[in-house]
Image (tube, rainbow, N blue to C red):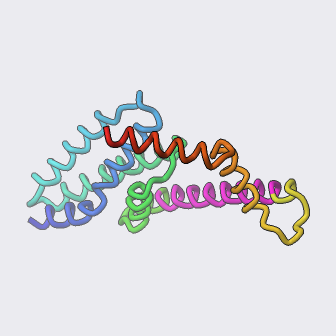
Amino acid sequence: MAGELGGLRRWKRFLPAFSTIDAAIESENPGNSRAKHRDARLEIIEKLIDAADDAAVAEKLCAVLDDVMVQSLQTLEMVATLASTDLAKDVGGLRNHESGRVRCLAAGVVCRWMASVKDELAEVSAAMEKLTRLLGPDDGTDHRAKIILEQRNRSSCGTSDSMAKRNSRLSVLRRS
C-alpha cells in the first residue's frame, strides 16, 4: 500500500498536465497524434497502481513517468504554441514537481512564455507610439476619440435617416 500511496500521491496532481500538454502539441500540429504517448502513459499508471505493495517498483515507475513528462515538455518547447490558461496553470504547477529535470523544464517553458508576452507587449506599445506620432502633435484634443468618431461616421452610412431605415427593417425581420 505504501508504494501506491507514494507513487500515486506524487503524480496525482500532475497527471492532468499530460492531457493539457498533449492537446497543445496536437493543436499546433494536428498530424502529430499523441495517442501512442497516452496509451503508454496509461499502461505505466496501471502498473503503478498494481505496484501497491512494492515501493521499489513504484519508485521506478515514477522515474519512468518523470522521463515521459520531460519528453512531453521538450516537445512542447519545440512547438510554437500559445499558453492557454489551463496549459499555463498545469505547466506552472510542474515547477513544484519532485523531479529536478521536470521542475527545470517547466520553469523554462513558463519563462519563455513570459518573455514572449513581454516582447509582444513591447511591439504593440511601439506600434501605438508610432500611431500617436503619425496623428500629429498633441494639441490638447483626444486623437483616439477623433478616430472612433470617424469610424462611427463611416459605418453609419453618413445619415441618421439611413440608420432609422435599417433599424426598422431589422425590427420587421425580427418579428417575422
Residue 125 colored in magenta in the image: yes
| Residue 57, picture quadrant | bottom left
Q: Residue 168's x, y, as percent?
A: 46, 44
Q: Residue 170's x, y, as percent?
A: 44, 42
Which residues make up the magenta segment?
A: 106-131
Q: Residue 25's x, y, as percent?
A: 43, 41
x 86%, y 54%: residue? 134
Q: Residue 44's x, y, as percent?
A: 21, 46
Residue 126 colored in magenta in the image: yes
- Compared to residue 30, the image places residue 139 above or below, namely below
Q: Of all residues shown, which one is farthest toward the top?
A: 31
Side of 124 relative to 166 (left or right): right
Side of 56 relative to 76 (left or right): left
x 19%, y 57%: residue? 58
Task: Pick whichever, 94 or 169, lies toward us.
Answer: 169
Question: Where's the C terminus, which quadrant?
Answer: top left
Question: Where's the N terminus, which quadrant?
Answer: bottom left
Q: How many marks?
A: 0
Side of 43 relative to 154 (left or right): left
Task: Pick whichever, 96 or 47, lies toward us.
Answer: 96
- Compared to residue 21, the image places residue 122 above or below, namely below
x 88%, y 67%: residue? 138
Kindly report the secondary structure that dominates the magenta region of the rendered protein: helix
Q: Of all residues shown, which one is farthest toward the bottom?
A: 140
Task: Pick whichever, 20 or 156, lies toward us.
Answer: 156
| Residue 93, picture quadrant | bottom left
x 51%, y 49%: residue? 82
